Amino acid sequence: MKPTINVYDDVTLVILQNIPADIGFVAGVFEKIAEMDIDVDMISLSPAQSSLTSLSFTIKDDDLVKLLGFTSTLNDDKIKPIVSSGNCKISINDAGMENCPGVAAKIFRSVAKVRTDIRLITTSEAQVSLLVTKSDFDSALAAINEAMI
């Protein structure tokens, strides 16, 4: 298996904590973001533990000001937006990952060895994406490249 590794910089992580655990609310969030012509990339919805949950997603740093205009309209006192900009995304892609146990473990172990600050992880059958801090990017990428040889 020889995966393709793509990297992206200037990525902002947005976390909306304490949102209603309602897919209609989530759809409304992404509809508003789409209306602002903001491209959303990584998305993770935490399992609901009550009537509330957390939603995490990434956007380009350049779109942060537009997005903050939207998050400021979330007037519910419970909803807490958390924003972290200046991150990097590393995506490891290979159709051979599907039905190949241990690939994620190998990737996670490689970045653990260099003590990478992981902000978000998303996966599919053929892709593992990690959002890392800019300060950890070089060592994380080197570790992943070495592990995937």
Image (cartoon, rainbow, N blue to C red):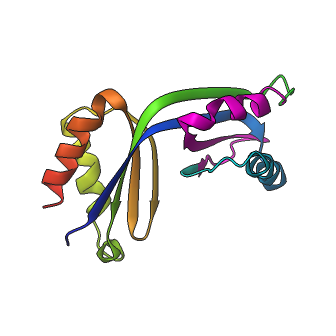
Q: Residue furthest top?
A: 77
Residue 61 percent coordinates (x, y) = 54, 34
Left or right, residue 133 beside residue 44: left
132 left or right of 27 in image: left
Q: Residue at x 38, y 58 (%)?
A: 128
Residue 122 included in the magenta stretch of the image: no
- The picture places residue 84, in percent across and down from the top left corner, at 53, 28
The percent coordinates of residue 82 (x first, y second) are 62, 27
Quadrant (top left/top right/bottom left/bottom right) for the N terminus: bottom left
Per the rendered image, the range of residues in magenta is 44-73
Q: Is residue 144 above or below residue 5?
A: above
Task: Tell me: residue 104, above or below residue 84.
Answer: below
Q: Position of residue 117 (x, y in %)?
A: 35, 31
Residue in front for this viewpoint, 113 or 9: 9
Please tell me which residue lies in front, 42 or 123.
42
Residue 99 in the figure: left or right of residue 40: left
| Residue 123 picture quarter | bottom left
Considering depth in this image, is 120 or 6 the residue closer to the camera?
A: 6
For image coordinates 62% across by 35% down, the residue present is 15
Q: Quadrant of the C terminus?
A: bottom left
